[in-house]
Amino acid sequence: MLKILKTNTLFYSSFFIAHLFLATFYIDLWRNDNTTSRVLPIAVFLEQGNFEIDKYQQFTGDKSYVAPHYYTDKAPLPALITLPFSVLLKKLNIITPIKESYYTPSLYALGGFVCGSLVLAVIVLITLKMLVKKKMVTLNPIHTVIWATLPFYSSFLFVYSGTFFGHLFAGGLLLASYVFIEKRAYFLSGIFIGLSFLSDYPIALIGLIWGLQIVVQKQWKGAFNFALGVLPSIGWILLYNYYFTGKAFTMLYKFVSQDYAFMKEGYGFALPKPEALWGLLISPYRGVLFYAPILLLFAFLAFKWPTKETIRSLTTNYLFFSSILFVLFISSYQMWWGGWCWGPRHLTTITVLWLFAGIKAFHHRKESIWMAYGLFVIGFIINFLAKSTIVYSAPSDIKFPLLETVMPNLLNDNFNPNNIASLALGASPRLAAILFVLLFVAIQGGFAVYYRFVLKESMRG
């Protein structure tokens, strides 16, 4: 039994490390407004011990002005999580200033690793463990490995690994909350959804819906524990708001720069717009079904033949109502498309849940497995072409980014140079893209063989 335990631990550990490497192979060093707004508070803290980004504020449009200082306008947790690592690396002289400035590419890389790469690796590990726990021994081991990984790598979520955005980080925390609420571990679910809210403010809506659903189920103790878990995050954001704006219930978003003046009224939210719903769900502009095509199959299977029991179970289904209301909420945002980005970045958090729940519900459907694999291939091609060229730099006015932005870059041999093979080994960006695909296939096949070995050992035990 001890030998089996060691074998399984080695399997999961090596799987995690391998996918951490894949998720970090492309690391974002570009100075995007969004990522820069998270890097600057860390840089100025290393330099002057506070979060006033005045000396660098011209480098980002994503900022708030609370006279007489400039601050980041982003949800705080991703930067605050990255901060202690930056302090440690500074003490070890791994992060060093350039001309006395800590506003360096190393902070972009560190934030991308902590809030992007690490999160994606954890998500696929959680998914693999869920599949193994559901005893997928009846299927070929390659199916287990593919179902644990390809739904994520064949979606726009993969593009945001290695980048210092907050959405994927919030999505990982939301997934933890979802796993715990499904197990009726309400306090832990509340803790994680509160942390997710501190990383992406719209998560508050999902937290409210889940709390109401627990009450509707008359789980009074569960509702109390859920609220108790959320409470520290609520208290923390009130203190954060008071520290920066002088009012506990006034957020930094209220003081955004003039370029985003529309956000000062209702924080940029109004009423849902039909064009936003089309754009967020279906269109090749920002449609989630285009940028995560496996969701087409999941949606079809989920609504194929609804039964009375399915309808009755909706009150205890933590995805149904939260998904509908969250999408409507984002469609009411004045800037629903998310600026320069790849896919519906404002739906990143809920997409993590859709993919995980879809895998859990439909991985065993053998009659649709080849359809799923076809969608995996299509999704991987769409998103890897972006990852290996423009990453998320799709201009807002480009209506078909794949054809109008990615393909011209691909045809002009303009590949993404910010990858391990190019930065460390001097390989051409095009060769690096080919190398990534070969490594990805080899790692998938290697772990399929390894998993078969683990299964045999476990069954002998």
Image (tube, grey):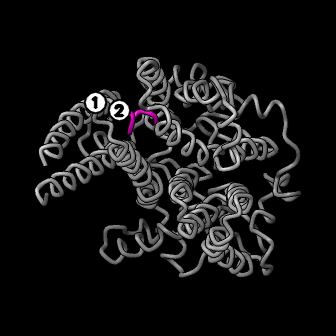
SS state under label 1: helix
Contact flag, marks 1 and 2 (Cβ < 8 Å): yes
Mark 1, residue position: 142
- Is residue 79 shown above or below 389? below
Disc 1 residue type?
Ile
Write down the quadrant of residue 443 in the picture. Answer: top left
Q: Is residue 193 left or right of residue 206?
A: left
Callout 1 environment at 10 Å: few (<14), some (14 to 19), or many (20+)? some
Q: Is residue 51 above or below residue 439?
A: below
In the rendering, at what x and y percent does residue 390 appear? 51, 34
Most foreground residue, 58 or 275: 275
Decide if residue 385 is in sight here. yes
Boundaries of the magenta span: 146-151
Indicate whether residue 340 is drawn in magenta. Answer: no
Q: What is the CA distance from the residue labelled 1 to the residue labelled 2?
A: 6 Å
Asked if residue 323 is positioned above or below residue 435 in the image, the reply reads below
Dot 2: element: helix
The residue carrying mark 2 is 146
**Which residue is at the front of the view, 77 or 12?**
12
Q: Residue sitting at 47 percent across and 40 percent down?
A: 360
For the point 74% across and 80% down, which residue is it?
242
Q: Is residue 159 left or right of residue 427?
A: right
Residue 389 seen by the camera: no
Q: Chief secondary structure of the magenta span?
A: helix
Looking at the picture, how far across and down is residue 444, in whole percent? 27, 33
Q: Where residue 238 appears, x then y in whole percent?
A: 72, 77
